[in-house]
Image (cartoon, rainbow, N blue to C red):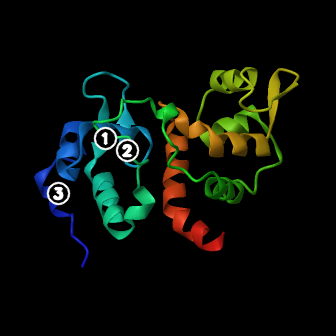
Amino acid sequence: MMTDYSFLRDEYPEIISQDQLYRICRISKRKATWLLENGYIPCEDSGKKTRRFKIRIDDVIIYLTKLEKHPESLQTPPGIFSTRTKCRSIAQMQEPIDQKIFTKMLKKEWHNFPDVLATNDVIKLIGYTQSTLSDWIIQGRIIGIRYYNLYLIPKDSLIEYMATKAHRIHQKSEKHKDLIRKYLEAQHTFLGGI
């Protein structure tokens, strides 16, 4: 029988802090930070050192319900919260996202878009700024073909980057977090079809 977490709405305000989150979920501060930074629990990230995250209690309830129903879909990389291992940056950790499944999801999600995207289309799809996209192109993370005063980006190049390396970004855009949430929701479906 599933736990009814609706009682949390009576005990906590609509928006909670990271401290409240780790107490509710009975997890370490480090794990709470990791879950928030990697989009497992949606949040508003101010980037400040104190009171950095604002989390909706409804999103915590959704996370706890999913964790109870499908714990395997919310697994964290083994050993990253162990006190025996040195704290590593997220970029150095084993990635929790299955690249093949995420690629398949993005292809399905973006199938109506053309094979070559203008930067404005890419911004709408992933929520990062023009300057961020330019940096990615200059650094060779994605392919960009200069066309007059803008770049054209092959959709396959964008999908490959988003599925393989983009989840290492610490400050994700809201659209990127939404894609990760959709991936987590769709993961079981794709696992069944692969």
Alpha carbon distance from label 2 to label 1: 5 Å
Mark 3 secondary-structure assignment: helix
- For image coordinates 71% across by 44% down, the residue present is 160
**What amino acid is at disc 3?**
Leu
Quarter of the figure with the N terminus: bottom left
Mark 2 secondary-structure assignment: loop
**Rendered image: mark on residue 82:** 1
Q: Quadrant of residue 22?
A: top left
Q: Nearer the viewer, mark 1 or mark 3?
A: 1
Q: Which residue is mark 3?
A: 8
User: Considering only order in the chain, which callout, 3 or 1, is on the residue closer to the N terminus?
Assistant: 3
- For image coordinates 22% across by 52% down, the residue present is 25
Q: Relative to residue 71, is residue 36 depicted above or below? A: above
Alpha carbon distance from label 1 to label 3: 29 Å
Instruction: Classify mark 2: residues with Cα within 10 Å, few (<14), some (14-19) or many (20+).
Output: few
Q: Is residue 86 left or right of residue 12?
A: right
Mark 1 secondary-structure assignment: loop
- Where is residue 125 shown, x and y percent of the image? 64, 43
Instruction: Classify mark 3: residues with Cα within 10 Å, few (<14), some (14-19) or many (20+).
Output: some
Alpha carbon distance from label 3 to label 2: 30 Å
Q: 76 or 113: nearer the eye?
A: 76
Q: Is residue 128 visible?
A: yes
Q: 138 or 151: nearer the eye?
A: 138
Q: Nearer the viewer, mark 3 or mark 2?
A: 2
Q: Is residue 43 visible?
A: no
Q: Quadrant of residue 35?
A: top left
**What amino acid is at disc 2?**
Gly
Q: Which residue is mark 2?
A: 79
**What amino acid is at disc 1?**
Ser
- Where is residue 118 shown, x and y percent of the image? 78, 35
Judged from this view, the residue extending furthest toward the left is 11
